[in-house]
Amino acid sequence: MTDGTSSTRGSRLPVDETVNAFVAFLFAASAPVAIILGAGLRGGLSEADLSSWIFAAFALNGALSIGMSILYRQPLAFFWTIPGTVLVGSALQTLSFAEVIGAYVLTALLLVVLGVTGWVRAAMDNLPMPIVMGMVAGVFVEFGLDWIRAFRTDLVLVAAMTAAFVILTVLPRVQKVFPPMIGVLVVGLAVLAMQGGDSAQAAGSGQIVAQPRFYMPVFTLAAALELVVPLAITVIAAQNAQGIVILRSAGHNPPVSAITTACGGASLITSVFGSVSSCLTGPSNAILVSSGRKDRHWLAAVILGGFAILFGIFAPFVTNLLLATPVAFLSTLAGLALLRTLLSAFQTAFATSFSMGALIAFLVTLAGVPVLNIGAPFWGLVFGVLASLVLERHAFAKGR
């Protein structure tokens, strides 16, 4: 404490950090939760299953965020893989939840191995990213289509939410204070209230505090082939890579291998409570570093972790509330939240090399036809790579 000025600065109240943490929390607690519910409902999961999933996704990853951020004095916010959630929703059409959880466990072990050995970068290079993103686009496009179809179901609600998204998106200064998806959520809830929905009554009528369920994993070859590699790719390439780039651009030096290992270790725990694999989040970390002093950004991640733990504890209340809302509300929330991710997937898939392989991966995945009881996303990757091996050998020669 030789410098009185720095001591004073260091002890000031974390106002900026708390605001950023709360905005990041609202982002994670709105549209991403809708994506979980959408994927889970498509897969036939019960309300109790979804509550346990949300508890693990928030409470356990919130604890991981606090621990890693304190350890490395960097903003390291962890949640769950959104692309992986969508893949799981598709896989549940042909696999049981126990089989999916078995794939979660295997994915977690793979992530630990890749992190401990330092093979993460090599693993990311083994599969051409355009083909992978073609497969991801094939899965995500259904959420975009559900948003468009929702106009037919509830024109006023969907139009109001979409208008809020457009208006906030074209106002970059406002975005920094009021992110578009938060505006979409607020406007959607306001319209539902004016329409006289019974969401609040439904939310207060059931269980309030989480009662996590423990699931015994079942290991099958079909689940392993369909989910393990795609899930690991979404964690490493689609999610962690995004978060790492964001943190580096803000002047931080995130520990890549330790992050991968932490994702795997956390996923071993969250998986048995029904949650998809953990990952370093991109959007939430971007919000955490959007303002304030760099040396205090880690405090924002710690505060965000505290919000996440509280949210996870009251997961049943939140689940009841969202399940009581119209399908059009959830479809619009999820569809708008995934628009930029879908755009990015298309841009990566078809920008340069491997475009034919990416197209085949997209079409096979979009068709959604399982073969040998293995879901379409896996076959999208297989046939996408085969198409590029036959038709785009020059792309492999260039190592792209």
Image (cartoon, grey):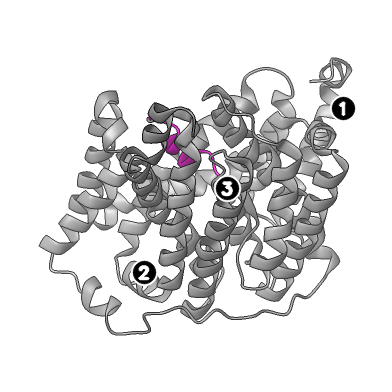
Q: Which residue is mark 3?
A: 70
| Res. 151 in view | yes
Position above or below: 63 against 248: below
Q: Quadrant of the C terminus?
A: top right
* Disc 1 to disc 2, C-alpha distance: 49 Å
* Disc 1 to disc 3, C-alpha distance: 49 Å
Lower position in the chain sequence, tag 1 or tag 3: 3
- Residue 289 at x, y = what percent? 45, 33
The image quadrant that residue 162 belongs to is top left
Near-viewer residue (294 or 254): 294
Q: Which residue is mark 2?
A: 318
Proximity of marks 3 and 2: CB atoms separated by less than 8 Å = no
Near-viewer residue (377 or 348): 348
The type of residue carrying mark 1 is Val
Q: Is residue 295 left or right of residue 269?
A: left
Q: Is residue 207 left or right of residue 121?
A: left
Disc ID at residue 237 = none
Position above or below: 78 against 2: below
The image quadrant that residue 244 belongs to is top right
Residue 289 within the segment the image draws in magenta: yes
- Residue 163 at x, y = what percent? 22, 38
The type of residue carrying mark 3 is Ile
Q: Which residues are magenta?
A: 280-291
Label 3: which secondary element: helix
